[in-house]
Image (cartoon, helix red, strand yellow):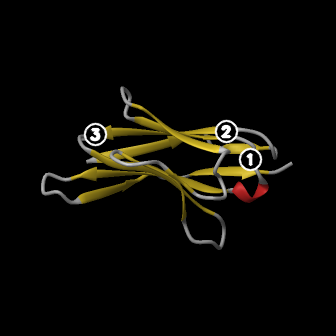
Amino acid sequence: QVHLVESGGGLVQPGGSLRLSCAASGMVLSINAMGWYRQAPGQQRELVARMPSRSSTVYADSVKGRFTISRDFGKNTFYLQMNKLKAEDTAVYYCKLDLWTPLGAVQEYWGQGTQVTVSS
C-alpha cells in the first residue's frame, strides 16, 4: 500500500509564493507519473501539473511560467513550487501518484489535499 502526505498549503497574498510537498511512503516501486491537481469550491478537480516518467511535463495553461513541479528522487517526495500566486489559484490542492502494477496496469494514489488561499 502507498500513502501520500501533503504539506505546505496556507494563506498567501497575491503575488506571493508557496511550495507544496507530497511525501510518498510504502511500496513505491515503479512510477508512471506524479502530478498535482486542484479543486476550487463549486468546480471540478483539474490538472495543474503532471510529470510522467517517460515523457514531457505538462502544465495547465493558467499556471505555465508560474508553477513548477519537481521531484526528489532520493526521498520519494515531489513538489509544486507556486510563484506569482493569484486569487484564482485558491483551491484545495491534491497530489497524485500513478504506479505501474506487476501486470502492467496503473494504480492511482491520491493525497488528502491541502488548502491554498490567495487573498490580501
As drawn, is 81 to the left or to the right of 111? right
Where residue 45 appears, x then y in whole percent?
A: 54, 66
Residue under the image location 33 percent in, 46 percent down: 54
Task: Pick whichever of labels 1 and 3 is earlier in the sequence.
Answer: 3
Instruction: Compute the Cα span from label 3 to label 2.
Output: 27 Å
Where residue 75 appears, x then y in whole percent?
A: 38, 28
As drawn, is 74 to the left or to the right of 30? right
Return the residue at label 3.
26
Give yes or no for contact between labels 1 and 3 (Cβ–Cβ under 8 Å).
no
| Element marked by disc 3 | strand
Q: Mark 3, mark 2: which one is toward the viewer?
A: 2
| Element marked by disc 2 | strand
Return the residue at label 1.
85
Q: Amino acid at mark 1?
A: Leu
Task: Pick whichever of labels 3 and 2 is earlier in the sequence.
Answer: 2
Residue 23 falls in which quadrant of the image? top left
Vertical comparison of 43 with 3: above or below: below
**Other residues around mark 3 within 10 Å, as few (<14) / some (14–19) / many (≥20):** few
Q: Amino acid at mark 2?
A: Leu
Q: Amino acid at mark 3?
A: Gly
Give yes or no for contact between labels 2 and 1 (Cβ–Cβ under 8 Å).
yes
Return the residue at label 2.
18
Q: Residue furthest front?
A: 56
Task: Pick whichever of labels 2 and 1 is earlier in the sequence.
Answer: 2
Where residue 67 appears, x then y in whole percent?
A: 62, 45
**Other residues around mark 2 within 10 Å, as few (<14) / some (14–19) / many (≥20):** some
| Element marked by disc 1 | loop
Q: Which residue occupies the foreground of this view, 51 or 94?
A: 51
Vertical comparison of 76 with 119: above or below: above
Where residue 119 appears, x then y in whole percent?
A: 81, 51
Q: Residue furthest left?
A: 103
